Image (cartoon, rainbow, N blue to C red):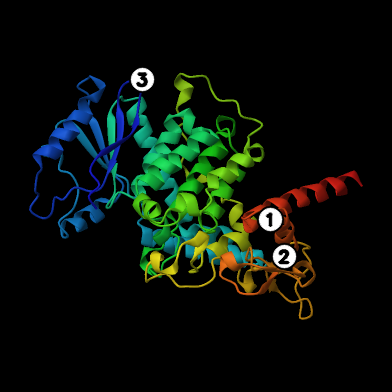
């Protein structure tokens, strides 16, 4: 997709560089590019030593060969001096989408008491196996950059899915800065947003089923696995990753809308929408890791996680917040959000309300009072946040013209309280309000 090799990280200690790009246009005829060979030679010699260089292809060898039919493919080591080519065997977006679908069925079954053959069913989803391949790939790149003092080039097919996963995770292993809250924000902005990861297509906002895949979710899960093995090396906690995950698909923030920086700039999202980072900055204390004690700079500076399946664990978010996560992983879309017109989103976007509704089958209890739904106590959607409540907890009526509604609409009590305070992000703010309320309730019961 025209993604030429670009340096995304520089090692100050040995002058090696981490480079990311798309696959070369080799084809069945094995075409060469003198300019490409010269550029890679410059990367190889960047350390000032005549060391080798690693070209890490995230795909399997079979997938790389298959792309040659389309005029693409992988590098030939004969044309690149002192370069080693390694295949990552990381699954493509279609396999990952199928894996998450299987995982959702397993989690749903367990939530309803079906725990028979749990570990066997979990293994059959291949979700943890796919995480292993990404963590192994990132660790390999980090090892070559730090210990072998060689520059590394990472690519997959188009340079925006597996490439982003491996290069971003490798930087977290290499650089302590990216283990801070500020650093992770910079990393997401740089390696995901600025490099053109297709958030809109991958999250299912457009009616393109074959383009939808939980690539960003999968990367956050990999980061969660590393954080679990090195809990004192990160300034942030698991809660920070959870909120990024949920809000990246909530459509409440303009940060993750559309596929490229150009599209976001053309639609003036910086002025028409709210940045998720602003909300995180206000609530930064709740993300801080109290046990944060980073290793001194030296050999302990680089993290080398164990990628064996025995060391991985299923992220509790899949089970603990099923109503939030699985509802966000359904083919709904947002439109006219923050003043962006439906036409500007493209013809593939379904024009519905800008708030995603949690489906009835995913909520058995009222989100606020937690009382179970029955034939008498029916489910009601809050038009401001999309969650399900009983009638007592949605007794308020408000006008929501900014969300495309005409007249007074049913709104939950939490969103009503936030609106009265003058907030314009009721869905997100009311979630924070509920968290504070739940914490106070826990403290009150503990005192009793």
Which element type, helix, strand or loop, lies under badge 1?
helix
Instruction: Name the one closer to the observer, 181 or 414.
Output: 414
Q: Quadrant of residue 363?
A: bottom right
- 365 vs 88, left or right, is right
As rendered, which of 234 and 270 lies closer to the eye? 270
- Distance from label 2 to label 1 (Cα)? 9 Å
Crowding near the residue tagged with mark 2, few <14, some 14–19, many ≥20 C-alpha atoms within 10 Å: many
Give the mark nearer the N terminus: 3 vs 1: 3
- Pinpoint residue 97: horizontal percent, then vertical percent: 43, 62
Tell me, for residue 13, which label it has, or none: 3
Residue found 27% across the figure and 52% down from its top = 157
Residue situated in front as seen by the camera: 393 or 59: 393
**In the image, which disc is placed on residue 412?**
2
Q: Is residue 85 left or right of residue 340?
A: left
Percent coordinates x, y for residue 345 in the rendering: 40, 65
Residue 2 higher or lower than 174, as above or below: below
Q: Identify the residue at horizontal 37%, vertical 40% (top origin).
A: 167
Q: Label 3, label 1: how many angstroms apart (C-alpha)?
A: 46 Å
Q: Which residue is drawn at 22% across and 50% down?
A: 2
Q: What element carries label 3?
A: loop
Q: Of marks 3 and 2, which one's residue comes earlier in the chain?
A: 3
C-alpha gap between disc 3 and disc 2: 55 Å
- Determine which residue is flagged by label 1: 430
Q: Is mark 2 on a helix, strand or loop?
A: loop
Instruction: Tell me, yes or no, whether the two marked residues, 3 and 1, touch with CB atoms within 8 Å.
Output: no
Res. 313 in view? no
Residue that protrudes farthest toward the bottom in the picture:
375
């Amino acid at each position: 997709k025209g993604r030429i090799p670009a340096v995304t990280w520089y090692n100050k200690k040995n002058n090696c560089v981490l480079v990311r790009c798309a696959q070369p246009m080799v084809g069945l005829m094995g075409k060469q590019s003198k300019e490409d060979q010269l550029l890679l030679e410059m990367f190889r010699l960047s350390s000032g030593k005549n060391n080798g260089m690693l070209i890490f292809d995230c795909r399997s060898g079979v997938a790389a060969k298959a792309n040659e039919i389309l005029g693409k493919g992988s590098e030939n080591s004969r044309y690149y001096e002192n370069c080693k080519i390694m295949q990552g065997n990381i699954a493509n977006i279609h396999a990952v989408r199928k894996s998450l679908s299987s995982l959702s069925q397993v989690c749903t079954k367990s939530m309803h008491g079906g725990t028979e053959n749990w570990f066997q069913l979990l293994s059959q989803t291949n979700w943890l196996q796919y995480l292993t391949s990404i963590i192994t790939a990132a660790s390999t790149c980090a090892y070559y950059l730090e210990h072998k003092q060689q520059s590394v080039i990472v690519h997959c097919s188009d340079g925006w899915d597996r490439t982003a996963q491996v290069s971003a995770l490798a930087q977290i292993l290499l650089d302590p800065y990216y283990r801070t809250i500020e650093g992770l924000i910079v990393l997401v902005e740089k390696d995901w947003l600025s490099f053109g990861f297709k958030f809109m297509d991958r999250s299912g906002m457009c009616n393109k089923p074959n383009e939808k895949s939980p690539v960003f979710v999968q990367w956050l899960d990999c980061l969660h696995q590393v954080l679990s093995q090195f809990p004192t090396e990160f300034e942030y906690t698991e809660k920070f990753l959870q909120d990024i995950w949920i809000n990246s698909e909530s459509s409440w923030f303009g940060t993750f809308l559309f596929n490229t920086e150009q599209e976001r700039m053309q639609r003036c999202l910086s002025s028409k929408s709210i940045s998720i980072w602003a909300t995180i900055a206000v609530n930064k204390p709740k993300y801080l890791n109290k046990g944060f004690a980073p290793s001194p700079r030296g050999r302990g500076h680089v993290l080398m996680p164990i990628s064996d399946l025995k060391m991985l664990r299923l992220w509790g978010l899949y089970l603990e917040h099923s109503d939030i996560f699985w509802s966000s992983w359904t083919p709904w879309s947002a439109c006219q959000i923050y003043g962006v017109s439906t036409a500007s989103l493209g013809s593939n976007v379904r024009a519905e309300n800008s708030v995603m509704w949690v489906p009835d089958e995913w909520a058995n209890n009222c989100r606020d009072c937690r009382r179970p739904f029955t034939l008498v106590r029916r489910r009601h959607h809050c038009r401001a946040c999309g969650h399900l409540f009983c009638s007592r907890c949605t007794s308020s009526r408000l006008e929501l013209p900014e969300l495309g509604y005409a007249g007074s609409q049913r709104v939950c009590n939490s969103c009503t309280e936030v609106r009265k305070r003058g907030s314009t992000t009721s869905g997100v703010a009311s979630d924070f309000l509920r968290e504070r309320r739940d914490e106070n309730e826990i403290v009150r019961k503990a005192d009793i």
